[in-house]
Amino acid sequence: MARAGAALCRACLALAATLAALLLLPLPPSPPRAPAPAPASRAAPASAGPLLRPDDVFIAVKTTRRNHARRLRLLLRTWISRARRQTFIFTDGDDPELQLQAGDSRVINTNCSAVRSRQALCCKMSVEYDKFMESGRRWFCHVDDDNYVNPESLLQLLSTFSPSQDVYLGRASLDHPIEATERVPGGGTVATVKFWFATGGAGFCLSRGLALKMSPWASLGSFMSTAERVRLPDDCTVGYIVEGLLGARLQHSPLFHSHLENLRQLPPHTVLQQVTLSYGGPENPHNVVSVAGSFSLQQDPTRFQSVHCLLYPDTDWCPVRRRGDLVSW
């Protein structure tokens, strides 16, 4: 009995010694902590394409011979001076002085009629489309000769889309789709079609991907015969092809502006962020953006010079003024 107790004591002592030894051993190193997830970066929009350069954009300015001195001189002095390589002027008559100012390759005589008619407008748009397709550029943007284009805002807007996708950007002048009757040769009707269109008076843009799909109805003079099917002017015909025939959709943008709007309602602090601006003209001379400037309304009735000098104060003819100094006059 005594022997058994002694053996038990020795076993307890051995166990205690073992436990003590284990307690004195260094603890195994902790497994490495998983790195904290990196802050999620803001991904580019799914549709955004590669970096866009100014030369990727083809800006077509539609005009007529009688407006060369009255309107184009102002555009050449202002925004076109900052976007010469992107800008092409489509007119209906030769003008050596304009060719000298803008560059011979930048002025295209469409040989379309100078009469303001549906057919003449569609004729010019047809030439604009073909010249864009020949250029190989990624984006086609059409404006009128009473638009101011902000090249930086335009590039920023287009950079959020992919030129290979179906993109049709602009501003509708109506609050509802237009309705047209399709016609076939011989006077027969096919159907009534509804579609949105971007008004040419505010300007609009088409991606190259969409322009390629438009080719059967727009290239090499086809645009004019397509326009005859619905008997609508140029900008409506673009909407008809895009929405009525291809099933793509106009993406409405509030950054495009035409003389059909009340331009004085545009908040002054947003003027420099717009893509296009316009003015009312002789029939509505007070319909201009409310923007401050060193030019009086008499000196600058369109406000284009004032806008330009706020955007580009380093322009040699601009009075010294701080960029962004926007106070309505």
Image (cartoon, helix red, strand yellow):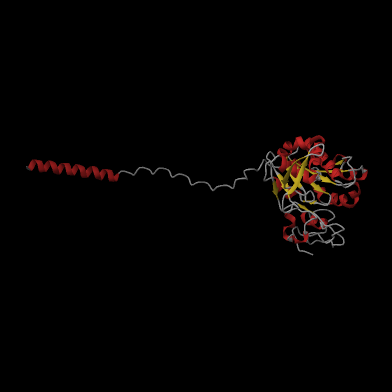
Instruction: Please say whether residue 53 is visible from this viewpoint.
Output: no
- Residue 95, position as x, y percentages in the image: 92, 44
Residue at 84 percent across and 41 percent down: it is 123
**Residue most toward the left?**
1
- Residue 290, position as x, y percentages in the image: 78, 61
Q: Nearer the viewer, residue 146 or 4?
A: 146
- Residue 116, position as x, y percentages in the image: 88, 47
Instruction: Please say whether residue 74 is visible from this viewpoint.
Output: yes
- Residue 161, position as x, y percentages in the image: 67, 44
Location of residue 69 with respect to 182 vertically, above or below: below
In the image, taking residue 218 as reference, residue 31 lies left or right, namely left
Residue at 19 percent across and 42 percent down: it is 14
Instruction: Locate residue 324: give its quadrant.
Output: bottom right
Residue at 76 percent across and 44 percent down: it is 181
Q: Nearer the viewer, residue 16 or 240?
A: 240
User: How many badges with numbers are in the image?
Assistant: 0
